[in-house]
Image (cartoon, rainbow, N blue to C red):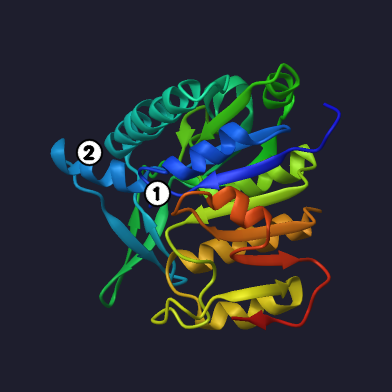
Amino acid sequence: MRHAPIVVKVGGSLEEPIGLLDDIAAHHGPLILVHGAHRVLDRLAVRLGHPPRFVTSVRGATSRYTDATAMDHFLMAYCGLVNKRLVQQLLSRGVTAVGLAAMDGGMVRGRRRADLRVREGERTLVLHGDHAGSIERVDITLPVRLMETGCVPVICPPALGDDGVPINVDGDRLAAELAIATGAARLLIFSDTAGFLADPADPASTVRRAGAADLDDLCVSAQGRARVKLAAVARGLAGGVADVGLCDGRGEHPLVAALDGAGTWFTATRAAMVRV
């Protein structure tokens, strides 16, 4: 592969990313598309009679409890419905897209955390049989070979756990690990906000530029998924990705706008924040 790829993460909040797919089809150069599907999964789980269960760990982090049934639904929503719809939409735009789960070919492996300690009110409980975990190893042989032939890998969780079962891993972290392993020039994480908001209640409070040294301060105001995204930003920068963007995936040309500087861009060296 002659040129470093870019890695584009399409968040599960963007269920019809038409403009983003148009931009990907027009992009010249190697590209990896990583996607989520949490909203589709939530609706599917409700329809199948096993609504999603979210729990709070003893450290205060909120996560999806993924038991065996929830993992079956996860595979249906992520690897089936959303992955293949994205592949179909890219193919219709002339892109040779290939849909993969992170576990395919042993591409991404991790450690399963089967027992989860959570808080419910004043009680601490241990939930068994969780199918969630953390990424430990990435083998880029498969996506690199695809990109060398002009294909766009379309990749989603789950990864493969150390005990041989699928594990739910965070999609933003997955994108960061793939960006690091492939030596990506840029990592762009798209969602339904204009970037990182200094004030979560103010959609016009986008931070324009920041550096790795600013991440701790930004975490103070971050809420919910924003904290997870900042963790992915930190991992990408620490792993050698020069530029990581939290970008708006809505509108007609979101990738073009992001590559021109729209959204929030982080670098390893810049320390002074620039706000709107």
Q: Amino acid at mark 2?
A: Leu
Q: Is residue 102 visible?
A: no
**Residue 64 percent location from the top left of the image:** 36, 53
Label 2: few (<14), some (14–19) or many (≥20) C-alpha neighbours in 10 Å? some
Which numbered disc flags the more N-terminal residue, 2 or 1? 1
Q: Nearer the viewer, residue 204 or 79?
A: 204
Residue at the image position 73 percent from the left and 19 percent from the top = 145
Asked if one can make out residue 188 in the rendered structure from this viewpoint, the answer is: yes
Mark number displayed over residue 101: none
Q: Nearer the viewer, residue 117 or 42?
A: 42
Q: Quadrant of residue 58?
A: bottom left
Residue 238 location in percent, x, y? 77, 59
Give the residue displayed 38% in from the left and 81% down from the top: 201
Residue drawn at x 32%, y 61% as measured from the top left: 55
Is residue 196 positioned above or below 104 on the image?
below
Q: Which mark is residue 44?
A: 2
Q: Secondary structure under badge 2?
A: helix
Q: Quadrant of the C terminus?
A: bottom right
Q: Note whether 211 is above or below 144 in the view shown.
A: below
**Residue identifier under label 1:** 14
